[in-house]
Amino acid sequence: MTKIYIIADNIISSLGFDTQQNIEKIAAMKTGVSCHFDTQIYPTPVWISKVDNQDLSTASKQLCQPQKYTRLEQLFLLSITDALQQSSIDIVSKETLIILASTKGNIDLLEFKNQDKFPSERVNLGSMAKEIQDYFQNPNTPLVVCNACISGVLALDVAKRLLRKGKYKNIIVAGGDIVSEFTLSGFQCFKAMSDAPCKPYDKNRVGINLGEGVGTIILSTEKPSNQATIITLEGGASSNDANHISGPSRTGDGLLIAIEKAMKDANCTSEELDYLSMHGTATPFNDEMEAKALVLADLQTVPMNSYKGYIGHTLGAAGVIESVIAIHSLRNNTLYCSLGFEELGVPEQLNIITKTSPAILQKCLKTASGFGGCNGAVIFAKQENN
Amino acid sequence: MTELIQKLKVQIIKQLNLEDVEPDDINADAPLFDADGELGLDSIDALELIVLLDKEYGIKIKNQDEGKQIFHSLKTMAEFILKQQS
Amino acid sequence: MQTFATTYPYCEIKDEKIILNGNIIFQEEDAAFAKFIKSAYSHLNLDYPKFHKMDRLCKLAFIAAYTLLGENGLKGYAPDEIGVVMANTHSTLHTDTKHEESIQDRNNYYPSPAVFVYTLPNIMVGEICIKYNIKGESVFFVSNHFDKNLLLEYSQDMLQDGSAKVCLTGWVDYTENGYYAVLFLVK
């Protein structure tokens, strides 16, 4: 089976503009979730995780003609550029593909205040992808995965399939979404938002904090020569609950299918998994569903966390950003505490990481679940480069 | 009360997109969210009822838990509205 | 008129016509979409109340799937053996606009969860999965151009690598200015 190597990565979020800044803040248990009052995006104060506009403005000056790009496009370009700088892959080669993951793309362009800033078709994800493709002068039409909150994890799984087939040598997977009036109002009418920093798996959890950002992972079938420790994407899978379009399955059987298929694909047993990076949105139903699935998969004793307490729920970016953090968790042999968790609030006994601590970690599972009843799972493994 | 219930029936049919349901088809005392219920309402419908109460009656409900008892039946909904209005 | 040289059963919906494996099985000339799709629902003798809550994009996808599969088109496959690969250009733009309109006026601010839930294109996949109890792998792509070969090849890869034993693959797009749907049953 073709090996798939993680060559480089980047995170842009409320915690910073590169992976290192993000990991440092997480290690120090700092959250990027805060209370914002901006009537342009919501009538009342909201607890969200936002990329600082001033920082973005400063960073974008590095880009060629930043005014030509929307907010999300700027974030994508910055993130992919940073990841590329850590690698030596040829971005203009036909052997390199870009895969983007996003739930709503340039949806802020639909807002009355943003009309006329860009041509109306820029709201199309394909047009957003073209801007990114053209900026990097890559010859292949990017793929765009638009699959609710599992988009990021699913994009990694799509990359896995294409790399194993030998269609491409390198694939850049970048997932991104912005906090917008559109999504804030939507999640609020679903009564899904928390009016404080979110508390995944906690007894007092009430909902999510919306977040924004971009995560980039560069994958290659060529083994990196300059890394002492190598991370590989071992396997992945997706599934559907076939239960309800917005509520997750009450049994967890859909997520179980994705987890078991991913393990089979990675030739990995539940005993081999050292750590689980879960979706953990902090809604009452999602976290309970995950707990049930983990028990069914016999993974309830494996140390686990959710990163949503640090960076909020970044939607299309979540699967990629959180995979990057999980990868660095493996690299650093560190289990990061599940911020926001105090008292168990699911019926199943889980091993939620309550204190950031060292641990020998070789393999981890990353999961995501989303509207439409979809679930995704990928498995990463670490090895020393000989 | 009867007038309010009749008005609610029409509003609910519209708000919840209940195709082929006439006001007379809805029993004011029957549980709205019964699993075997005639109307087949789900969690999204429960959230839509929260929007309806806000939009048509200016009453704000915080979340589905708060709404559980209020939305038990059309009758309990009407009683709640009348109580809020007095 | 685009014709498909394919060995897979397929359903196409365009210009108020439903075409199954090359044969027009239903049409309602010059009907507005809402009327057309409602008539199609009746013509197919569907009894599925959830249909009426779907947005136009999902209704289009659902009717295409039902025309192609009927009630028993996926019998013989375990739920997790069935894959779904779908795509379009406009994602959920029609419903996005509806949601946006509901939040324009701060003095008349009533966003609707029943509208918002349909602002993700993979919901059409979810609706089909619920109807047919499909629990397998799926993905939704968005692209400016309909690349039929890319979608069929991706589905064939899923069959080849054992991710699925059968795959519902297609393109379903809806805007105010036009709509088009084509679904293949890839085996």
Image: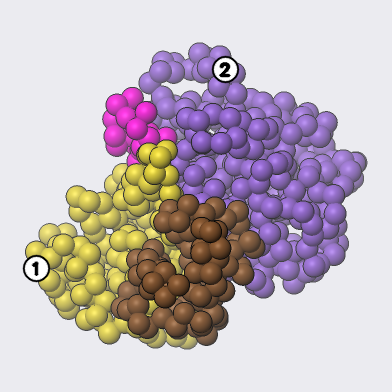
Q: In the drawing, does residue A320 fall left or right of residue C185?
A: right
Q: Mark 2 points at which residue?
A: A54
Disc number placed over residue B27 in the picture, else none: none
In the picture, the quarter occupied by the C terminus of chain A is: top right
Q: Name the residue under label 1.
A: C29
Magenta span: predominant SS is helix
Q: Residue C65 appears in which quarter of the rendering?
A: bottom left
Q: Chain C, which colour?
A: yellow
Measuring from the top left, give residue A172's x and y in whole percent.
53, 38
Question: Is residue C80 visible from the viewing direction of this image?
Answer: no
Q: Is mark 2 on a helix, strand or loop?
A: helix
- Residue at the image point whose x is 71% and y is 45% from the top: A198
Residue C183 or residue A240, whichever sits in front: A240
Measuring from the top left, give residue A135's x and y in whole percent.
41, 25
Q: Is mark 1 on a helix, strand or loop?
A: loop
Q: What stretch is highlighted in magenta?
A: A107-128
Q: In the drawing, does residue A320 fall left or right of residue C107?
A: right
Kindly identify the amino acid type of the residue bearing the numbered disc 1: Glu
Question: Is residue A53 visible from the viewing direction of this image?
Answer: yes
Kindly identify the amino acid type of the residue bearing the numbered disc 2: Gln
Label 1 crowd bin: few (<14), some (14–19), many (20+), radius 10 Å: few
Label 2 crowd bin: few (<14), some (14–19), many (20+), radius 10 Å: few
Q: Chain B, which colour?
A: brown
